[in-house]
Amino acid sequence: AWDKVILPRYAGVLGIRDLSAHNQAMMCKFVAEVLQFSDIPCYQWLASQYCRNNLPSGNRTRDTTFWKGHKTYIPLVLFSSRCSLGSRALVSFWQDQWLEVGRLMFVLPVLYSFAKDKLCSIQSQITQDGWDIQLHPNLSHTATQELQVLLDLIANVTPTAANVDRRVSSLFG
């Protein structure tokens, strides 16, 4: 019966908002703000406390119950948004869509299997001298081919710290 109650009014029912879906959307919006260096002080504070210039992963002893609850939404935010690069600290190299070709974990799956850190940021993969992709040694033939494709894709990408990372929903265009 509940699945009928939450249908829109034009369908002839009550049109009660699905609070679970609404809560999930609000949590994702909150996490997205933390992950893109917002100019709002509370988001800045959360990013400085829990992100420390890298995407949070795993359980850390200093994570509060509040942050543990929010951190569970990070994968959903990553998979439902596209990024434009700025400081590149909170944009996932493999899981975010920051290149036009799509998410690197899907475009280059064999190479992704050799990644040392599957949730690494773009910032962790670039040095002053250029790109330094952190991979496990002894790449397979296919992974070596995919690495060359990756290097061609990112050859002209030069993120600048002067800009801020922007996260835009990819669900609506």
Image (spheres, rainbow, N blue to C red):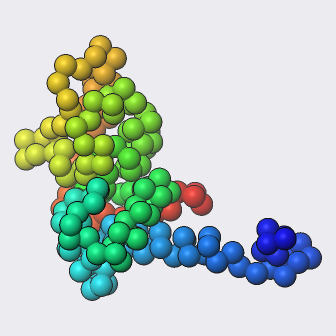
- What residue lies at 37% left-to-right and 65% top-to-bottom? 71
Closer-to-camera residue (115/150): 115
- What residue lies at 47% left-to-right and 58% top-to-bottom? 76
Q: Residue reaching furthest bottom?
A: 41
Q: Quadrant of the C terminus?
A: bottom right
Closer-to-camera residue (16/104): 16
- What residue lies at 44% left-to-right and 36% top-to-bottom? 106
Closer-to-camera residue (86/171): 171
Q: Residue reaching furthest top?
A: 141
Residue 157: tell me if it is visible: no
Closer-to-camera residue (70/107): 70
As displayed, is residue 33 above or below residue 143? below
- What residue lies at 30% left-to-right and 84% top-to-bottom? 42
Q: Quadrant of residue 47?
A: bottom left
**How far from the left and from the top, in percent, is residue 62?**
20, 71
**How far from the left and from the top, in percent, is residue 18?**
69, 75
**How far from the left and from the top, in percent, is residue 110?**
36, 26
As displayed, is residue 60 above or below residue 126? below
Q: Quadrant of the N terminus?
A: bottom right
Residue 5: tell me if it is visible: yes
Q: Quadrant of residue 33?
A: bottom left
Instruction: Give the total number of marks visible in the rendering.
Output: 0
**How far from the left and from the top, in percent, is residue 167?**
40, 63
Q: Residue reaching furthest left?
A: 129
Along the horizontal axis of the image, is 16 left or right of 131?
A: right
As displayed, is residue 162 above or below residue 140? below
As displayed, is residue 48 above or below residue 108? below
